[in-house]
Image (spheres, rainbow, N blue to C red):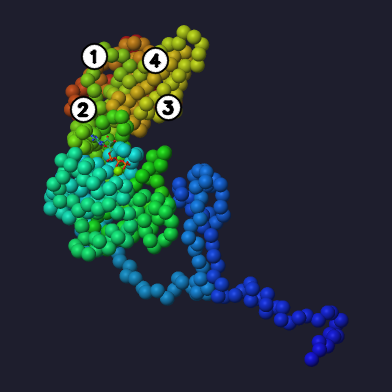
Amino acid sequence: MADSPCTCGEPPVHRTAVPFLFSLRYDPAMAKINKRYVCQSCGSVTHRWQGQCADCSEWNTLMEEVPVTATPFQAKHNLQGGGRTIALVGLDAEIALPPRTSFGIAEFDRALGGGLVAGSATLIGGDPGIGKSTLLLQAAAALARRGHDVAYVSGEEAADQVRLRARRLGLGDAPVRLAAATSTRDILTTLSQDRPPALLVIDSIQTMHSDLIEGAPGTVSQVRASAQELIRFAKERGTAVVLVGHVTKDGTIAGPRVLEHMVDTVLSFEGERSHQYRILRSLKNRFGGTDEIGVFAMVAEGLEEVSNPSALFLTQRDEGVTGATVFPALEGTRPVLVEIQALVVRLASGATPRRAVVGWDSGRLAMILAVLEARCGLSFSTCEVYLNVAGGYRVQDPAADLAVAAALVSALSERPVPADAVAFGEIALSGELRPVAHAPLRLKEAAKLGFERALLPDSAAGAERDVMRRSSFRTLGQFVDHLLGRG
Ligand SMILES: Nc1ncnc2c1ncn2[C@@H]1O[C@H](COP(=O)(O)OP(=O)(O)OP(=O)(O)O)[C@@H](O)[C@H]1O
Ligand SMILES: [Mg+2]
């Protein structure tokens, strides 16, 4: 039948056109595909490619990840209903503290918060060549020698290389099960065959590969998926997993930030490669405090425990040397005595003087110099200033201000700080001295090493019985007058 003209005079509408367009737009069988771009540096996700990551400002780090598919089922159903109900319990339910297994390496146990927890996941980060593999091989061997089943999987080195290291460290006879592998499926299949080990070391997580998703080892999605599989194995089978993680150039653990959230404990292995000492610092611990550190010294036979770190950082001291002060630093709750050295060189020419700092914050040095100049009338403007923390130690404690000021004043005036004195305290921009935390702990450690006098801020906390003589000051001006013998 031919289309009859409409009474309104409008041209006829082709009825088939409407369902055709409708089907193009609303075909329920067609899944919606969202592209995801993941930053390989910080793990942030965007839906558009950009040359620079908006979160961490790194260039060319966004890479496309496996697309997320919103299925028609998901679109049509409310997925927040229809699940099983779970039991909600009170906080007061009886629960035992997790038992801890000691490695027999006191400094390692201490950093872990008292030993290894079964079923836990630990991540250890550190600079290349700092000694991560050495530390974990020593820890693995120590645990194996105590009768525990230990597996060590290296994705970075061949089995022979690890064996050579073990022989060098005198651990060749330790009953550690060793493998060189990178596939998480192979590793977990092998370990599931008989009783799961008490400890599984993975060196490193960046070399692991999961075949559940695509991508090269080391990419954010691979690191995350491999870690997820290993951690699931740890939780299900009660094996403690220790993952070695690479670090980026600014010292944070490479790969997704979420990796640090996935594990129970994050440890950082730090130190200057040119120096002997290494510090194992706990950054996060779901089973204990993060205020403990383990101190080691790297020697030819591997890492040696240092139970008295102050002795390591306080090198032989001569009386009468100018520009050196001893500072009782605090690492968590552990005091460590370090020597702060300053050198001040007067410039005859009008050249811009240099300021160089090793082991401390250069911004903080500029601040102390400014306060010394503005509040105490000491001028460093025509002098080059060098500041060094002995032993390659890095001071982060704000209490170092007063020790730094003492070293600077001593270097400028060429009058030594008394050899039996330690100094600590925070300096305010007003020139006032502020007391700092844990003064008794610092004093006790200094007294243990033979120091007899403490130069510190005036504070109400002087009531407790003193372990040494105190000279306390309210302002930096008074402190400088004391050092220069003016008051
Ligand atoms: N034959 C040796 N004698 C003495 N010390 C050695 C010897 N071989 C290696 N070392 C020390 O061990 C360190 C390397 O340790 P290790 O391989 O454990 O580091 P790593 O943190 O695992 O490095 P990477 O990030 O490359 O895996 C070297 O920097 C060196 O100080
Ligand atoms: Mg290594």
Identity of the residue drawn at 67% across and 79% down: 19
Inter-mark Cα distance, 4 to 2: 27 Å
Q: Quickly name the residue at label 3.
A: 362
Inter-mark Cα distance, 3 to 4: 15 Å
Inter-mark Cα distance, 2 to 1: 17 Å
Could you tell me which secondary element the residue under label 1 belongs to? loop
Identity of the residue drawn at 36% across and 31% down: 398
First in sequence: mark 3 vs mark 2: 2
Quarter-wise, where is residue 469 in the image?
Answer: top left
How many marks can you see? Answer: 4
The answer to whether residue 453 is visible is: no
Q: Quadrant of the C terminus?
A: top left
Q: Quickly name the residue at label 1.
A: 319
Q: Quickly name the residue at label 2.
A: 311
- Disc 4 to disc 2: CB gap under 8 Å: no
- Disc 2 to disc 1: CB gap under 8 Å: no
Identity of the residue drawn at 41% across and 42% down: 248
Q: Inspect the image, locate mark 4, and give the three-letter code of the amino acid beneath it.
A: Val
Q: Indicate the position of residue 270 as horizontal and vertical percent values.
A: 31, 37
Q: Quickly name the residue at label 4.
A: 344
Q: Quadrant of the N terminus?
A: bottom right
Q: Inspect the image, locate mark 1, and give the three-letter code of the amino acid beneath it.
A: Glu
> Is the residue 195 above or below the residue 72 in the image?
above
Could you tell me which secondary element the residue under label 2 belongs to? helix
First in sequence: mark 1 vs mark 4: 1
Q: Residues within 10 Å of mark 1 (few under 14, many from 20)?
A: few
The one of 280 and 185 positioned closer to us in this rendering: 185
In the displayed structure, does residue 68 sit left or right of residue 449? right
Could you tell me which secondary element the residue under label 4 belongs to? strand
Residue farthest to the bottom, as pictured: 1
